[in-house]
Amino acid sequence: MIPLGACAHPLVVAAGGDLQIGGRTTAQALAGLAVLDGDLRFANLEGPLTARGAEDEAAQKFAAPPEQAAGLRGRLDVVSLANNHALDQGPAGRDDTLRALRALGIAGVVDGERVKGVTFLARDFAPSADLDEETELVEAVRRSAQPVIVSLHWGHTGSLLPTGAQRRLAARLVDAGALAVLGHGPHSPQGIERRGRAVIAYSLGNLAFSCPCTDARDAYVLRFRLSRGGVEDVRILPLRAGLGGEPPRISDDPGLKQLLDELSHDLAARPGG
């Protein structure tokens, strides 16, 4: 049995992938975050919420005025700020982001944060990173109060399959005590894998993107219940990502469902890394 600490009752986690707010973000797009239906709602926030600097879509350097994110209130509980765009306006811009999120009742995770009785750890790994040499994060999971969820910004853009090194690191994190590994970064979806009482989502894909720098609409919401027995009732909800000001929405496209099933089945058929 896994001690849940402050989580006296099961929590439903709803996790989405990359979320970027900018000049093209609409109130309608943010309202679409209602697709994250749960007690603990997660996304990876790409880019700072700050009045410093300026958005430069051509250079993929992001910034959004904090007031533009008002629609996040009540729709997210925790976001990762460990990604390649969190420092687009420098450390001060990231500090502004943390303050803006806090004012909206949302926790921003740079390294680690306790949210609703769950420890969130977040890291950003470049595609060239030697994941087999990563030990600090594994030790951080082992030391942290349970339950632990790890957010990883990693992988190769457009890839539908994780690398062997990604699978090996995810396995080590779970073996150290993580109950969920939530991956994002490729913008494309990758499958999920069960390992004991835990779940690994290698890439959730896009959730909503303001910048016209990605056209990847295939994605999913991962929904599961954290209980004393671990992760239960895991569901993959196919998602049409919100791009160009459109809201994200749950998809009834049978082709997308089949893709997500096949990606996960492929992982199950090839155990390990």
Image (tube, rainbow, N blue to C red):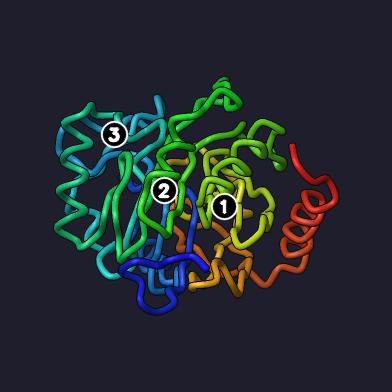
Q: Which residue is mark 2?
A: 44
Image position of 170 (left or right of 95)? right
Q: Which residue is mark 1?
A: 204
Numbered disc 3: secondary structure? loop
Image position of 175 (left or right of 100)? right
CB contact under 8 Å: marks 2 and 1: yes
Q: Residue at x 25, y 55 (%)?
A: 69
| Residue 160 in view, yes or no | yes
Q: Position of residue 198 (x, y in %)?
A: 59, 59
* Residue nearest the viewer, comparing 163 with 96: 163
Q: Which residue is mark 3?
A: 55
Q: Residue at x 60, y 75 (%)?
A: 233
**Which one is closest to the eye, mark 1 or mark 3?**
1
**Number of residues whose C-alpha sits closer than 10 Å to that of mark 2, classed few (under 14), some (14–19) or many (20 or more):** many
N-terminal of the pair, mark 3 or mark 2, is: 2
Q: Position of residue 96 (x, y in %)?
A: 16, 41
